[in-house]
Image: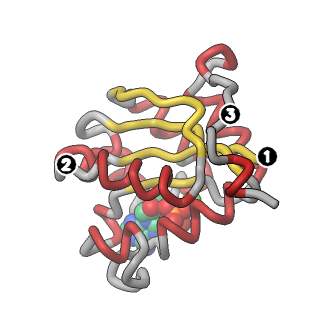
Amino acid sequence: MERTFVMIKPDGVQRCLIGEIISRLEKKGLKIVAMKMMKIERDLAERHYAEHKGKPFFESLVSYVTSGPVVAMVVEGKNAIKIVRTLVGATNPAEAAPGTIRGDFGMEVGRNVIHASDSPESAEREIALFFKPDEIVEYRRIDEDWLYE
Ligand code: DAT
Ligand code: MG
């Protein structure tokens, strides 16, 4: 099993997409093992997006993700990092395929609704930034025997 970090960004919360997005993750077979609504402070936003520091969009990205509440999650499943990135779609919603979260719900790159970790290293780093170990819950989904062979 693999864990990934997912965050519904402020536009996703304000546009009332929390339920829709969680529903897509659940129906796919992914398991939510931690979740909280929170307002991100500037320091956390800058650390979360540290790899983009210095890029032209960094300031607007930080002010966007700190502009309202977000929903932070740890999502678990076999190959969860890749599977969630596939559900999320391309970074720019204008190019994201229909059927993906960004493809279905976004219009431009600066308001792309959702974040998901892009590698095992970033998943580990991002989960640790947002959650304490005891906030992550271990349990079995009742359908796990039917999701995995
Ligand atoms: P992703 O969120 O798909 O992992 P990323 O890590 O390259 O994409 O960038 C992080 C966020 O920064 C992205 O969700 C939206 C914003 N962003 C990326 N490239 C951008 C650009 N060229 N112009 C404006 N915002 C951008
Ligand atoms: Mg990224």
Instruction: Tell whether 10 sits left or right of 128.
Output: left
Which of the marked residues, 2 or 1, is nearer the chain's N terminus?
1
Instruction: Give residue 65's position: percent from left, percent from top.
Output: 34, 44
Which of the marked residues, 3 or 1, is nearer the chain's N terminus?
1
Which of the marked residues, 2 or 3, is nearer the chain's N terminus?
2
Q: Nearer the viewer, mark 2 or mark 1?
A: 1
Q: Let me know if residue 42 appears in the view.
A: yes
Query: What amino acid is labelled 2 in the image?
Result: Cys
Q: Secondary structure at mark 3?
A: loop
Instruction: Tell whether 43 sits left or right of 85.
Output: left
Which image quadrant is residue 116 in? bottom right
Q: Which residue is mark 2?
A: 16
Q: Secondary structure at mark 2?
A: loop
Mark 2 → mark 3, Cα distance in angstroms: 28 Å
76 w.r.t. 137: above or below: below
Which image quadrant is residue 92 in? bottom left
Q: Which mark is residue 140?
A: 3
Mark 2 → mark 1, Cα distance in angstroms: 30 Å
- Which corner quadrant holds the C terminus? bottom right
Instruction: Give residue 17's position: percent from left, percent from top.
Output: 26, 52
Q: Secondary structure at mark 1?
A: loop
Residue lying furthest left: 15
Query: What amino acid is labelled 3 in the image?
Result: Arg
The residue sitting at 49% across, 50% down in the picture is 26
49 w.r.t. 113: above or below: above
Q: Residues within 10 Å of mark 1 (few under 14, many from 20)?
A: few
Instruction: Give residue 49's position: percent from left, percent from top.
Output: 53, 48
Q: Let me know if residue 56 appears in the view.
A: no
Query: What amino acid is labelled 1 in the image?
Result: Met
